[in-house]
C-alpha cells in the first residue's frame, strides 16, 4: 500500500475477499462484511441461497449470515462509503507513484501541464495557474484545495478524508449532512425538508462525537467476548485432541478384543483340526493294516494256486503223491479263509454351534457393543447367576434324533469341551479362556 495510508490501514481491509482487488462500489451486508457489487451479483447467480427475487436472501460468503435483499435488488444494499473513500484515496496514491498527474482543465485544451493540487469539491487535479484562478472565482473560492505534496502527507490525507462525500440513497446527487434520530439514518437536505420535517434531526458534524463515543463504548464488551471465544476455541482444540485419543483408545480395545477372540477361535480350531487329523491318521493306519493282510493272503493264494497247477501239470505220480496231502491242506485252508468286511472307521461330524441368523445377536453380545455414556447407565447386564454356555446344543439347538446320530459339542467356561460320537463316547478338549456365547 502506498503513502501514509499504508501505515494505518492494512491491505486486507480495503480488499474484496472475492475478487482480491481493492473494493469497487462496496456493498455492506448485515454482518458488516462488504463486497464489490459485481462480486455479490456473481455470487447470487451461483448460490442457491441467494437468488435475489426468488429467495430475497443473500448469505454472506464469509460468515454465512443471512441478509435480506432490498426490493430494488443488490444495488439497494447500503454502500460502504468508508471503504469507497479509502479505496479511492489508495488508488490515487498508487497512481501518483506510477505516472505523472496532469491538470484536467489544461488537458481539455490539449495541453499537458503537471498537476499542482487537487480540488476536493470538484474532485479534479489542477495546475498552479488553474489553482489561483479557482481560488479567485466566486463559485469556487470556498473549495478545498490540497497540493500534491500535501496529498502524500498524513495531514493532507485527513483533509481529503474530511471532504469525502457520502451521497443520499434517496437523492443520489445530494450529500448527506443530517442524521434523523427518529429514523436512525443519515439524510440529505431534501430528505430533511420533505420526509423528516417533524423528526428529531441534527447535523452530522454536531453528532459525530456522540456517535463515536457510542461505538467506542461497545468495543470493550466485544473485545472481552473475543477473549472468551478464543479461550473456548482453545478448549475445543483440547477437547478434540482428548476425543481423538479416547476414540483411539476405544478402537484399540475393539482390536484387542477381536485379536483375543481370533486367538481363542484359532486355538479351538487347531484343537478340533488336530483331533480330526488324529482320527484321519488312525483310520489310515487301520485301513493300511487291513490292506496289507489282504495283500499277504492274495499273494499266498496266487503262489499256492500256481504251485498246485504246476504240480498237477508237470509232476510224475511219485511227486504228486508225495505232495498231495500238504497241497490239499494248503488249498483247503486258503479256500476257507474268511475275508472280513471293510473295517468300521471313526467318522467325526462337525456340528456348528452358532447359526448366522438365530445366534447373530448372541455372538455380538459376546464380542461387545459400543454404547454412549447415557446408554451405558441404563444397559442391563446379562444374568450372571448361571454359567454361560460356550455352545449349548442340549436345549433347542439339537433334537434327540440329532444327539443320537450326530456328533455335537457341549460345555461351559470352566469345563471341558466334549466331542461325542453316536455311541456316546466322550473325548475331552481343554476349553480354558474360550469366550462364552451370551
Image (tube, rainbow, N blue to C red):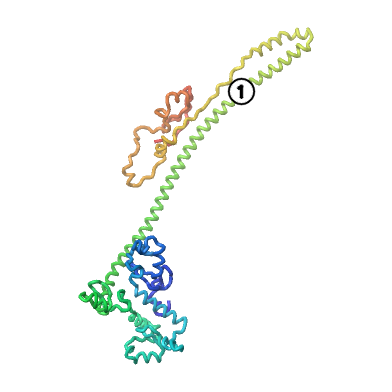
Quarter residue 75 falls in: bottom left
Q: Position of residue 81 (x, y in %)?
A: 34, 75
Q: Position of residue 62 (x, y in %)?
A: 38, 64
What residue would you read off at disc 1?
289
Quarter residue 202 falls in: bottom left
**What residue is drawn where x is 63% and y is 22%?**
291
**How many badges with numbers are in the image?**
1
Quarter residue 51 falls in: bottom left
**What residue is drawn where x is 58% and y is 20%?**
342
Q: Secondary structure at mark 1?
A: helix
Query: Which quarter of the image is occupied by the N terminus?
Result: bottom left
Q: Position of residue 137 (x, y in %)?
A: 34, 91
Residue 115 in the figure: left or right of residue 335: left
Q: Position of residue 244 (x, y in %)?
A: 41, 53
Q: Is residue 256 shown above or below 21?
A: above
**What residue is drawn where x is 45% and y is 45%?**
255
Can residue 209 be seen here? The reply is no
Residue 336 in the figure: left or right of residue 400: right
Query: Which quarter of the image is occupied by the C terminus?
Result: top left
Q: Is residue 194 shown above or below 326?
A: below
Foreground residue among 276 and 59: 59
Mark 1 crowdedness (10 Å alpha carbons): few <14, some 14-19, many ≥20: few
Can residue 342 be seen here? The reply is yes
Foreground residue among 310 and 11: 11
Name the outermost residue toward the left. Answer: 198
Q: Is residue 73 shown above or below 133?
A: above
Amino acid at each position: 500500500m502506498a503513502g501514509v495510508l499504508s501505515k494505518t490501514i492494512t491491505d486486507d481491509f480495503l480488499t474484496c475477499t472475492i475478487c482480491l482487488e481493492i473494493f469497487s462500489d462496496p456493498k455492506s451486508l448485515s454482518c458488516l462484511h462488504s463486497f464489490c457489487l459485481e462480486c455479490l451479483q456473481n455470487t447470487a447467480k451461483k448460490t442457491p441461497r441467494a437468488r435475489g427475487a426468488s429467495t430475497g436472501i443473500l448469505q454472506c460468503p464469509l460468515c454465512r449470515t443471512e441478509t435480506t435483499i432490498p426490493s430494488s435488488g443488490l444495488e439497494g444494499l447500503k454502500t460502504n462509503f468508508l471503504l469507497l473513500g479509502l479505496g479511492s484515496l489508495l488508488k490515487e496514491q498508487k497512481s501518483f507513484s506510477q505516472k505523472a498527474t496532469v491538470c484536467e482543465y489544461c488537458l481539455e485544451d490539449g495541453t499537458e501541464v503537471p498537476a499542482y493540487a487537487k480540488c476536493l469539491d470538484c474532485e479534479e487535479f489542477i495546475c498552479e495557474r488553474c489553482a489561483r484562478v479557482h481560488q479567485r472565482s466566486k463559485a469556487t473560492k470556498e473549495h478545498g484545495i490540497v497540493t500534491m505534496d500535501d496529498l502524500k502527507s498524513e495531514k493532507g490525507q485527513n483533509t481529503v478524508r474530511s471532504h469525502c462525500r457520502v451521497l443520499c440513497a434517496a437523492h443520489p446527487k445530494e450529500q448527506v449532512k443530517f442524521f434523523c434520530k427518529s429514523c436512525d439514518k443519515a439524510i440529505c437536505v431534501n430528505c430533511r425538508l420533505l420526509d423528516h420535517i417533524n423528526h428529531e434531526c441534527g447535523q452530522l458534524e454536531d453528532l459525530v462525537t456522540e456517535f463515536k463515543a457510542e461505538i467506542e463504548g461497545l468495543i470493550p464488551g466485544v473485545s472481552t467476548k473475543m477473549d472468551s471465544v478464543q479461550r473456548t476455541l482453545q478448549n475445543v482444540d483440547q477437547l478434540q485432541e482428548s476425543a481423538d485419543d479416547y476414540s483411539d483408545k476405544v478402537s484399540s480395545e475393539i482390536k484387542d478384543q477381536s485379536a483375543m477372540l481370533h486367538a481363542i477361535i484359532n486355538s479351538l480350531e487347531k484343537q478340533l483340526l488336530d483331533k480330526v487329523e488324529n482320527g484321519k491318521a488312525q483310520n489310515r493306519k487301520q485301513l493300511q493294516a487291513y490292506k496289507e493282510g489282504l495283500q499277504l493272503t492274495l499273494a499266498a493264494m496266487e503262489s499256492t494256486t500256481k504251485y498246485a497247477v504246476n504240480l498237477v501239470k508237470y509232476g510224475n505220480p511219485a511227486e504228486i503223491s508225495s505232495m498231495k496231502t500238504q497241497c490239499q491242506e494248503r488249498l483247503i485252508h486258503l479256500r476257507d479263509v474268511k475275508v472280513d468286511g471293510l473295517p468300521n472307521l471313526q467318522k467325526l461330524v462337525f456340528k456348528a454351534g452358532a447359526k448366522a441368523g438365530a445366534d447373530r445377536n448372541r455372538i455380538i453380545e459376546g464380542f461387545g457393543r459400543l454404547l454412549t455414556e447415557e446408554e451405558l447407565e441404563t444397559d442391563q447386564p446379562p444374568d450372571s447367576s448361571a454359567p454361560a454356555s460356550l455352545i449349548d446344543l442340549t436345549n433347542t439347538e439339537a433334537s434327540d434324533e440329532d444327539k443320537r446320530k450326530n456328533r455335537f459339542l457341549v460345555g461351559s467356561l470352566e469345563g471341558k469341551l466334549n466331542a461325542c460320537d453316536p455311541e456316546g463316547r466322550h473325548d475331552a478338549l481343554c476349553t480354558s479362556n474360550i469366550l462364552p456365547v451370551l
